[in-house]
Image (cartoon, grey):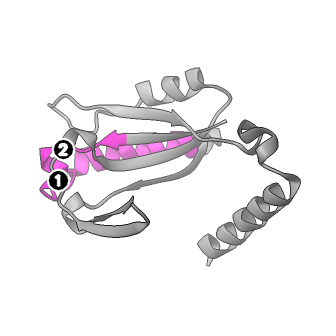
Amino acid sequence: MRFMVMVKANAVTEAGGMPDEKLLTEMGAFNEELVKAGVLLAGEGLHPSSKGARVRFADGKTTVIDGPFAETKELVAGFWLLQVKSREEAIAWIRRCPNPAPGQESEIEIRQVFEAADFGEEFTPELREAEERQRVEAEANRRG
């Protein structure tokens, strides 16, 4: 099972504030534990929403909305992609994570990633084959 784990943004991350050396060291050690356990597939911090954009789809048209975005509590400041055996295991790992906003209340959201089997019969063998090919090509692109 794969889980997307999202670190919620706050006023500091949205203002472009960077973590201090202590937090970088603690997060680095946590990430190293994830790597050694073989559960970390990806993990990155994100720039503030002022450097981002949203694309809205409505009535057959697309509209680009430049950041920043107002609802900080709904934004993501960073993420991990974990491969674990269960939701409970993902939760157990994240409970060990250093507080991403030391001295402040913070929140990390955990969401399961859909797998091919979750889509049922509508996900035909042809669609499954195309999806697998795309996965292989994307991995090759990532490796550069």
Mark 2 is on which residue type?
A: Glu
Magenta stretch prevailing secondary structure: helix
Residue numbers of the magenta segment: 7-35
Mark 1 is on which residue type?
A: Glu
Camera-side residue: 115 or 36?
Answer: 115
Camera-side residue: 134 or 1?
Answer: 134
In reply to whether residue 84 is colored magenta, the answer given is: no
**Residue 14's disc number:** 1
Q: Quadrant of the C terminus?
A: bottom right
On screen, residue 85 versus residue 43, left or right, reads right
Pinpoint residue 52: horizontal percent, then vertical percent: 27, 65
Q: Residue at x 63, y 75 (%)?
A: 141
Q: Residue at x 17, y 53 (%)?
A: 14
Q: CA distance from mark 2 to mark 1?
A: 10 Å
Q: Nearer the viewer, mark 2 or mark 1?
A: 2
Q: Where is residue 29, by image quadrant?
A: top left
Q: Residue at x 28, y 33 (%)?
A: 99
**Residue 71's disc number:** 2
Q: Quadrant of the N terminus?
A: top right
* 48 up-or-down from 41: above or below: below
Camera-side residue: 105 or 23?
Answer: 105
- Disc nearer the start of the sequence (2/1): 1
Crowding near pointer 2: few (<14 within 10 Å), some, many (20+)? few
